Amino acid sequence: MTNRDKTFLLSGNESTCIPLGQIHALENPGVLLLEVIEAQTGSYLGKDYIVRLDDFYAEFKDIVCKSKLIADDYC
């Protein structure tokens, strides 16, 4: 997990807080599938405020989905 200028590992059942507007990135360095649960707080819970600075995984997701290595409900 990279949150602003800090990079650190999170293990199972661990979490982190990302303040509104904070630049952040998530990477799975392990071999097991990563499951992310996002929880939002505040008066507005929409997703239209998200700005993707670099969608590094879009191409990877396309490859994985086309290969049928992952469930269709993910793709």
Image (tube, grey):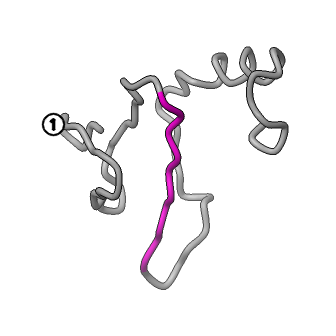
Q: Position of residue 29 (x, y in %)?
A: 36, 24
**Residue at coordinates 62% horizontally, 58% vertically from top-left?**
48
The kind of residue tagged 1 is Asp
Q: Give above or below for 17 relative to 68.
A: below
Q: Position of residue 42 (x, y in %)?
A: 43, 81
Q: Is residue 37 magenta?
A: yes
Q: Position of residue 38 (x, y in %)?
A: 49, 60
Residue 57 falls left or right of residue 16: right
**Residue at coordinates 50% horizontally, 58% vertically from top-left?**
37
Q: Quadrant of the N terminus?
A: top left
Residue 58 falls left or right of residue 21: right
Residue 9 falls left or right of residue 20: left
Residue 58: image quadrant is top right
Q: As drawn, which residue projects farthest toward the left? A: 6
- Of 45 and 17, the residue lying toward us: 17
Q: As drawn, which residue projects farthest toward the bottom? A: 43
Look at the numbered disc 1 and give the secondary structure of its residue: loop
Q: Position of residue 55 (x, y in %)?
A: 55, 27
Q: Give above or below for 57 relative to 36.
A: above
- Of 7 and 12, the residue lying toward us: 12
Count neighbours of disc 1 (C-alpha within 10 A) and say few if under 14, some if 14 to 19, many if 20 or more. few
Q: Quadrant of the C terminus?
A: top right
Q: Give above or below for 62 relative to 10.
A: above
Magenta-colored span: 32-41
**Residue at coordinates 22% horizontally, 42% vertically from top-left?**
4
Q: Principal SS element in the magenta part?
A: loop
Q: Circle 1 is placed at which residue position?
A: 5
